[in-house]
Image (tube, rainbow, N blue to C red):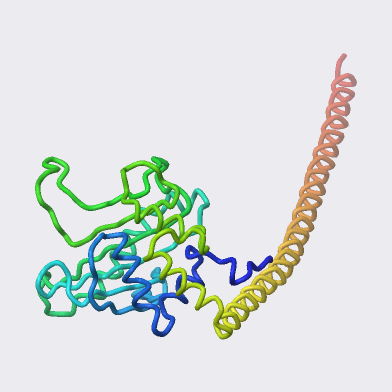
């Protein structure tokens, strides 16, 4: 398992992004600047909860871990807060990409289920915007921004606002005429270095990133996380070896039992063949005796 150095991590890395969001004196400003570029508007105070976990309603139900959960104090409507779930995602295997729409649907459902208290009006339900940021194209259409929102199929122009929206941001997309500031931000998030901080805002963000990367405690925490992951991998390999040996033992025992059954079946077949042969011999002898007796009885 090869560990990338902390200074080489980009903002699509879970560890660096999560650390930026929670870093004292930086986190709220950092996410506000990113949201400002994505939505092209100013943001007020934000409540930041890194890696918020929604557990399943039962032990056999699936939970969800949101990388960065942000809640705006006031949303678009009076009394309606907006929740932003921001998810940098490097997991680009085909199966995971194909499941993205259902994954974001699940995130919406888990956030909704926990945001409305018993007895509250549905009007109080928070707006939820899930933002997936990836270096791969989730839909293969080369768009930098894919905005997903419910609508009426029969009357597409009919207003229908249920407060749910999903944004898929593809760092290398070229279609859709995205704002230049967003292009620069997504490029910087994938290639996080001072030379890619083209605007004053990105230069400010880059200073925050360098401050976090140069923090000895952050470096130590990153090393500890890597060591824990490495230990889990080794444990997994050891467990895999043990499981493989156990499986091999079980397969060997199964093959032995199959061979024993086959031998027993062969012995039974041989016994049946021997009995059939003896019966045939007895029948042949009886037939011969009857023929001889018939010959003696003839005048």
| Quadrant in the picture for residue 31 | bottom left
Residue 199 in the image, given as x and y percentages of width and height: 39, 60
Residue 74 visible to an observer of this rendering: yes
Q: In percent of the image, x 81 and y 40: which residue is there? A: 273
Q: Residue furthest top?
A: 299
**Front residue of 267 and 129:** 129
Depicted 182 relative to depicted 34: above or below: above
Q: Residue furthest front?
A: 200
Q: In percent of the image, x 88 and y 29: which residue is there? A: 289
**Is 175 on the left or on the right of 291, as rendered?**
left
**Front residue of 9 and 262:** 9
Residue 71 in the image, given as x and y percentages of width and height: 27, 75
Residue 95 in the image, given as x and y percentages of width and height: 49, 50
**Is 56 on the left or on the right of 248, as rendered?**
left
Name the image quarter holding the C terminus: top right
| Quadrant in the picture for residue 117 | bottom left
Q: In percent of the image, x 15 and y 46: which residue is there? A: 152
Residue 63 visible to an observer of this rendering: no
**Is 176 on the left or on the right of 233, as rendered?**
left
Residue 157 in the image, given as x and y percentages of width and height: 11, 44
């Amino acid at each position: 398992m090869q560990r990338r150095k902390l200074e080489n991590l980009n903002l699509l890395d879970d560890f660096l992004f999560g650390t930026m969001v929670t870093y004292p004196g930086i986190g709220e400003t950092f996410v506000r600047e990113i949201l400002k570029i994505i939505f092209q508007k100013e943001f007020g105070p934000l409540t930041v909860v890194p890696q918020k976990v929604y557990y399943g309603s039962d032990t056999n139900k699936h939970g969800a871990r949101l990388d960065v959960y942000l809640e705006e104090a006031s949303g678009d409507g009076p009394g309606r807060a907006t929740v932003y779930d921001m998810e940098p995602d490097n997991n680009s295997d085909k199966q995971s990409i194909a499941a993205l729409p259902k994954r974001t649907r699940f995130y919406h459902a888990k956030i909704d289920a926990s945001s409305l208290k018993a007895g509250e009006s549905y009007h109080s339900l928070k707006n939820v915007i899930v933002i997936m940021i990836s270096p791969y194209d989730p839909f293969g259409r080369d768009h930098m921004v894919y905005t997903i929102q419910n609508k009426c199929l029969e009357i597409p122009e009919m207003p229908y606002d249920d407060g749910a929206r999903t944004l898929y941001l593809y760092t290398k997309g070229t279609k859709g005429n995205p704002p230049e500031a967003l292009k620069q931000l997504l490029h910087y998030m994938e290639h996080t270095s001072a030379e890619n901080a083209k605007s004053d805002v990105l230069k400010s963000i880059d200073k925050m990133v360098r401050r976090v990367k140069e923090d000895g405690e952050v470096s130590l925490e990153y090393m500890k996380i890597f060591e824990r992951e490495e230990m889990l991998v080794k444990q997994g390999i050891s467990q895999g070896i043990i499981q493989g040996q156990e499986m091999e033992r079980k397969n060997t025992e199964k093959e032995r039992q199959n061979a024993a059954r086959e031998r027993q079946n062969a012995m039974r077949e041989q016994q049946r063949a021997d009995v059939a042969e003896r019966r045939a011999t007895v029948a042949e002898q009886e037939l011969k005796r009857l023929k001889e007796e018939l010959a003696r009885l003839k005048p």
